[in-house]
């Protein structure tokens, strides 16, 4: 009993408001978990920098041309109601394509007023790779 008491007493302790607070050893498992998480976090920061970075404000613009194309153009151009636009940038000059979008042609309505110059440019850029 005495021995146990001494051992107990030899622990580091603070007295706070007359209350004795002893410092127990941090459990080994907790230390191991800490190191695993710390190493994982460093590895993550190094190998996955893109995931940590805040998405730049411009990111949603990346596929805007595609979104407009799929949302608007394909409603006619994928149904047989209008010519297939695969490879259209190979057979039509850039200005003509943009003019068809802006001013329409025959049965294609003018839809230029729906989009900014920049958006029409993005649709054109998307069409370059549309096959
Ligand atoms: C309401 C249906 C409709 C929508 C929406 C539409 N088009 Fe058209 N488009 C047509 C039709 C019909 C033609 C064929 C016009 C003609 O006979 O001269 C055409 C022709 C074209 C042509 C010329 C193709 C060629 O081979 O000569 C291009 C380029 C074109 N459209 C691009 C677009 C783009 C880009 C969009 C979306 C921003 C779009 N169109 C939206 C109906 C549509």
Image (tube, rainbow, N blue to C red):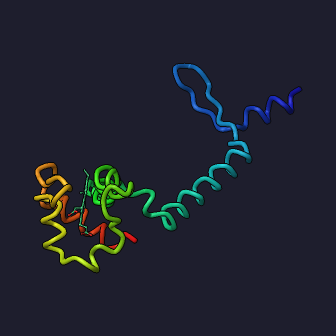
82 or 89, nearer to the observer = 82
Tell me the residue at 35%/65% (across/down).
84
Tell me the residue at 51%/67% (across/down).
47
119 or 55, nearer to the observer = 119
Q: Is residue 94 above or below residue 31?
A: below
On screen, residue 123 versus residue 15, left or right, reads: left
View quadrant of ligand 1: bottom left
Tell me the residue at 18%/74% (across/down).
94
Relative image position of residue 8 (x, y in whole percent): 76, 32
Relative image position of residue 46 (x, y in whole percent): 49, 67
Relative image position of residue 25 (x, y in whole percent): 70, 42
Residue farthest top in this picture: 18
12 or 69, nearer to the observer = 69
Tell me the residue at 26%/57% (across/down).
58
48 or 62, nearer to the observer = 62
Q: In which quarter of the image is residue 19?
A: top right
Q: In this view, does 91 lie above or below 21?
A: below
């Amino acid at each position: 009993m005495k021995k146990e008491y001494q051992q107990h007493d030899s622990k580091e302790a603070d007295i706070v408001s007359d209350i004795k607070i002893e410092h127990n050893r941090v459990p080994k498992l907790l230390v191991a978990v800490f190191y695993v998480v710390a190493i994982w976090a460093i590895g993550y920061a190094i190998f996955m920098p893109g995931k940590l970075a805040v998405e730049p404000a411009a990111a949603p613009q990346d596929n805007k041309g595609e979104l407009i194309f799929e949302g608007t153009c394909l409603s006619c151009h994928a149904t047989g109601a209008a010519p297939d636009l695969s490879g259209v940038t190979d057979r039509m000059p850039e200005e003509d394509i943009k003019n068809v979008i802006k001013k329409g042609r025959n049965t294609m309505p003018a839809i230029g007023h729906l989009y900014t110059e920049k958006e029409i440019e993005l649709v054109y850029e998307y069409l370059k790779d549309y096959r």
